[in-house]
Image: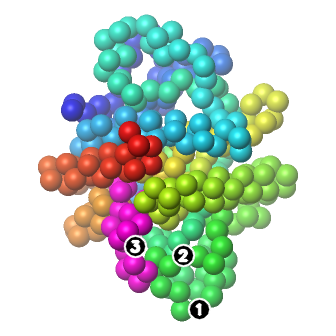
Amino acid sequence: MSALHHSELSGLRLISRGKVRDIYEIDGDHLLIVASDRLSAFDVVLPEPIPGKGEVLTRVAKFWFERTRDIIPNHLSELPLEQAVPDAAERERLGDRAMVVKTLKPLPIEAIVRGYLIGSGWKDYQASGRVCGIELPKDLRMADRLPETLYTPSTKAEVGGHDQNIDFARTVELLGTDLAEQVRDTSIRIYDECAAYALEHGIIIADTKFEFGLDAAGRLHLIDEVLTPDSSRFWPADEYRPGASPPSFDKQFVRDYLETLDWDKTPPGPRLPPEIIRRTAEKYREAEARLTGA
């Protein structure tokens, strides 16, 4: 399987090239989002792509967009890809990596939802007994299920920057009370319902992030990606043991490898060994198979 580090499409204007996604303008109402095979870790884009990763991300995102349609509308458009990218060779190169979406106004926050105590949340708890300012019971262990689902939003960083955690009061300042509450409540509902589904299929969704946008009428939509191995921490339920960092189906596998290196987590990122690339690609594909049956 060939990898796509970055896309090149004739006839469409490239608006941005993010950590993973290339975004093109189709017309005033539609965008084309291409999930490349680039991998970012610690907010740094790594030199080597993961073959097939972008296709997994896109198929999984579309799966969840469909499952959450009754909770919140999303940015997927019915405009055919053939109309957006008429060149058959270019479409073949994209594979399943492309989504045609409606042009919406993105909100300036990432809605992070945590169901388990891991990652930066665990480090925060060890230092303060809190996660993003939210007080938690004493004596929780690494990877413990949290007493309740936590909503811990952050700002959205530019490529090469680091997202910054913010409290709910700050989201009210940025969005207004009604919209901030709607984003929080919708995020928690999506997580709780989808995490329950995933658990039935052998995957624990430890935490995740959502992004939202508004249409011209001010109606909230789910955008970007949803509950993918890039935006979430996936653990195999049959190997879950509180008290240690569980194995994962997501890029945590790469993060764990990078933590063994003498690297200061600033660009440029280190090159990944072929074995790490191969095993990472396998983990992405297994996550998709468990969740979607594909």
Q: Magenta: predominant secondary structure element?
A: loop
The percent coordinates of residue 18 (x first, y second) are: 45, 38
Residue occupying the far right of the picture: 178
Q: Earlier in the sequence, mark 3 or mark 2?
A: 2
Image side of residue 72 versus residue 62, left or right? right
The percent coordinates of residue 267 (x first, y second) are: 32, 52
Q: Can you tell which mark lies on residue 138?
A: 1
Q: Can you tell which mark lies on residue 240?
A: 3
Quadrant of the frame with the C terminus: top left
Q: Is residue 280 magenta?
A: no
**Dot in front, 3 or 1:** 3
Quadrant of the frame with the N terminus: top left
The vertical placement of 210 against 264, above or below, is above
Does the image show residue 82?
A: yes
Res 168 quadrant in image: bottom right
Callout 2, which amino acid? Answer: Arg
Residue occupying the far bottom of the picture: 139
Does the image show residue 46?
A: no
Residue, x 45% and y 48% (percent of image)? Answer: 291
In the image, which residues are magenta? 234-251
* Mark 1 nearby-residue class (10 Å; few <14, some 14–19, many ≥20): few
Mark 2 = which residue?
A: 145
The vertical placement of 222 against 206, above or below, is above
Q: Earlier in the sequence, mark 3 or mark 1?
A: 1
Pick whichever, 161 or 33, lies toward us: 33
Callout 1, which amino acid? Answer: Lys
Q: Earlier in the sequence, mark 2 or mark 1?
A: 1
* Mark 3 nearby-residue class (10 Å; few <14, some 14–19, many ≥20): some
* Mark 2 nearby-residue class (10 Å; few <14, some 14–19, many ≥20): some
